[in-house]
């Protein structure tokens, strides 16, 4: 499971240090793709296979399913870490997520997300304001958090 928030920077060659706590879970190779909310999604191969199966089950007769599947898979690329624990992010993915220098790498259960620091701070501030309302709508716990 991936969790936590880490601040890192992209170097001049487009490489980003993956937090040490995430490296083992990602394995020797993993998939990076365009994510929602202008971030990148990073999946270990085992989780990527699960996502692939879920998306394959969508009906090709529905234009939304076709569009989402195209968007998700066309941006996907298999990546590996170098000896220093860095990943080289393809230009098209960096552009999608507006990654220039300062980044935030977060763990989100079965995946890692890579955000530009500016977009993450904006998203985080907006979401924090409505966190209680969202929790009431989505979370059905029989105990207090």
Image (cartoon, grey):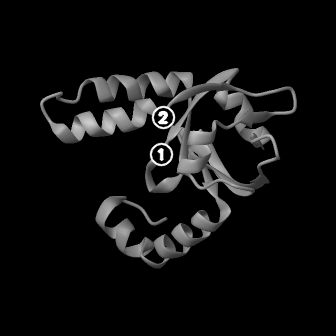
Q: With respect to residue 38, does 54 lie above or below?
A: above
Q: Residue at x 29, y 66 (%)?
A: 137
Determine the image quadrant of residue 77. Answer: top right
Write down the residue under mark 1: 35
**Residue name at image x 63 percent, y 36 percent:** 90
Q: Nearer the viewer, mark 1 or mark 2?
A: 2
Along the line of sight, the residue nearer the viewer: 32 or 125: 32
Dot 2 corresponds to which residue?
75
User: Is 92 positioned to the left or the right of 4 in the image?
Assistant: left
Which is more toward the observer, 120 or 112? 120
Along the viewing direction, whichever of 99 and 84 lies nearer the viewer: 99
Residue 144, quarter of the rendered image: bottom left
Name the outermost residue toward the left. 61
User: Looking at this rendering, what residue extends furthest in the right direction?
Assistant: 84
* Other-residue count near label 1 (Cα within 10 Å), few / some / many at <14 / 14–19 / ≥20: many
Above or below residue 8? Residue 44 is above
Helix or strand or loop: what does disc 1 sit on? loop
1 and 2 marks in contact (CB < 8 Å): no
Q: Is residue 4 above or below residue 81?
A: below
> Would you say residue 77 is visible in this rendering?
yes
State which tag comes first along the sequence, 1 or 2. Answer: 1
The answer for how far apart the CA atoms under marks 1 and 2 are is 9 Å
- Relative placement, left or right, of 109 versus 87 is left
* Image coordinates for residue 91, horizontal then vertical, percent: 63, 40
x and y percentages locating residue 139 in the rendered image: 35, 60
Residue 98: give x, y in percent of width and height: 59, 56
Which disc is residue 97 wearing? none
**Pointer 2: residues within 10 angstroms few (<14), some, or many (20+)?**
some
Residue 17 shows in the view? no
Q: Who's the residue at 18% across and 38% down the image? A: 63
Q: Locate residue 59, reporting x and y percent.
A: 17, 29
């Amino acid at each position: 499971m991936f969790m936590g928030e880490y601040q890192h920077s992209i170097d001049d060659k487009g490489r980003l240090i993956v937090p040490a706590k995430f490296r083992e879970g990602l394995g020797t190779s993993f998939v990076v793709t365009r994510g929602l909310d202008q971030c990148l999604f990073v999946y270990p191969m085992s989780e990527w296979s699960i996502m692939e199966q879920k998306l394959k089950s969508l009906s090709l007769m529905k234009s939304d399913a076709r569009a989402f599947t195209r968007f998700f898979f066309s941006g996907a690329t298999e990546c590996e870490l170098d000896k220093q624990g860095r990943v080289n992010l393809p230009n098209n993915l960096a552009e999608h997520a507006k990654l220039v220098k300062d980044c935030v790498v977060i763990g989100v259960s079965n995946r890692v997300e890579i955000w530009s620091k500016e977009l993450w701070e904006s998203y985080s501030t907006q979401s924090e304001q409505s966190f209680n309302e969202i929790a009431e709508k989505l979370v059905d716990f029989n105990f207090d958090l």
